[in-house]
Amino acid sequence: DHVHNRGRNYQWSLGDFEIGAPLGRGKFGRVYLAREKTMHYMVALKTLYKVELVKGRVEKQVMREIEIQTHLKHPHILQLLTYFHDTKRIYLVLEFAARGELYKELKRQPDGRFNEHLSAKYTYQVADALEYCHKNDVIHRDIKPENLLLTYDGDIKLADFGWSVHAPSSKRFTLCGTLDYLPPEMVMGQTYDVYVDHWCLGILCYEFLAGKPPFLSDTQQETYTKIKTMYIQWSDKIKPGAKDLISKVTFMFHIFIL
Ligand SMILES: CC(C)NC(=O)[C@H]1CCC[C@H]1Nc1nc(Nc2ccc(C(=O)N(C)C3CCN(C)CC3)cc2)ncc1C(F)(F)F
């Protein structure tokens, strides 16, 4: 009915939501559980402080994240439902993933790793999301456990398109966080294409099965060297079938590129 059914041009605002518990901290502000007042729809409300965005010189990146995530609609991609702002903050109204952050689920496992069934399920769902992104000329560029969330049913939601770009691209970006997932061509600062996501998918699958990424080293330099030489020590936890899959997904394209 007209009261509840808001048209496309409806201007959402903070008053439309009841704010609940904090879900944790995002990069530029807190994330809260919230409930939309008329339909009682549960959402995640991500707040971004404008001052912080300016200080971090990431306004364009945030605009790109909003632009990209608004247009991607896929069961394994966390949807950006709407956004609005007030004087101090930008608010992203995102899908609420009831079972939270996958990397915490990984750490909660008895030996820090998923069994083959779960690893295959999650790897498949991320691959499904990536295929959809690539069909829409979007490279995610930052596939790793920290950027994956789990729904109530235990399905994957790919989130955080803060580093995504339109393919192909040679956009260099200052690295923040782990190098473990960087493919060789990005380490060498060359142009890259959707294959960077394939590389990361292989690294992700390895980490699900082994409980740690393949190039983990004590120093950054060592990690770089292992990546550039594609020197991978196969954990004994990885069976031949999985090793074959990871090699094909991760290394195959890079043999052509390098
Ligand atoms: C991908 C991106 C990099 N990550 C993020 O944005 C992070 C930063 C903060 C939270 C998360 N962002 C989201 N989190 C959820 N769901 C969620 C999260 C945490 C818990 C949880 O375990 N607790 C509350 C526990 C409950 C128990 N207590 C003890 C600890 C916290 C349960 C459900 N849905 C949507 C989002 C989103 F993305 F839309 F914002």
Image (cartoon, rainbow, N blue to C red):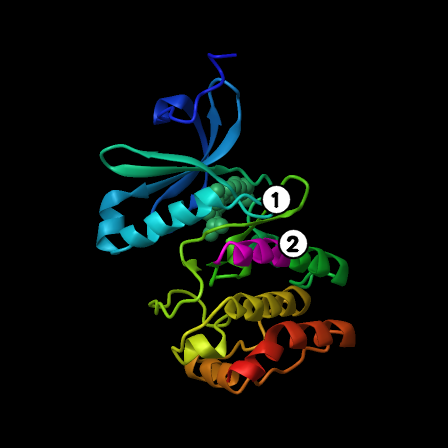
Q: Is 76 one of the magenta-colored residues?
A: no
Residue 165, relative to residue 88: is it above or below? below
Does any portion of residue 237 appear in the rendered image? no
**Disc 2 residue type?**
Gln
- Disc 2 to disc 1, C-alpha distance: 9 Å
Q: Earlier in the sequence, mark 2 or mark 1?
A: 1
Residue position marked by numbered label 2 in the rendering? 125
Residue 87, relative to residue 235: is it above or below? above
Q: Characterize the magenta stretch by its predominant secondary structure.
A: helix
Q: Residue at x 72, y 60 (%)?
A: 120
Residue 8, relative to residue 223: is it above or below? above
Left or right of residue 204, residue 190 in this image:
left
> Residue 40: x, y in percent?
53, 22
Q: Which mark is residue 134?
A: none
**Disc 1 residue type?**
Pro
> Residue 76: x, y in percent?
60, 48
Q: Residue at x 41, y 81 (%)?
A: 188
- Magenta range is 125-137
Q: Is mark 1 within 8 Å of ligand 1?
A: no
What is the secondary structure assignment of the residue under circle 2?
helix
Q: Nearer the viewer, residue 199 or 9?
A: 9
> Residue 153: x, y in percent?
68, 41
Left or right of residue 98, residue 169 in this image:
left
What is the secondary structure assignment of the residue under circle 1?
loop
Q: Residue at x 47, y 86 (%)?
A: 225
Q: Nearer the viewer, residue 68 or 250?
A: 68
Residue position marked by numbered label 1 in the rendering? 75
Does any portion of residue 258 appear in the rendered image? yes
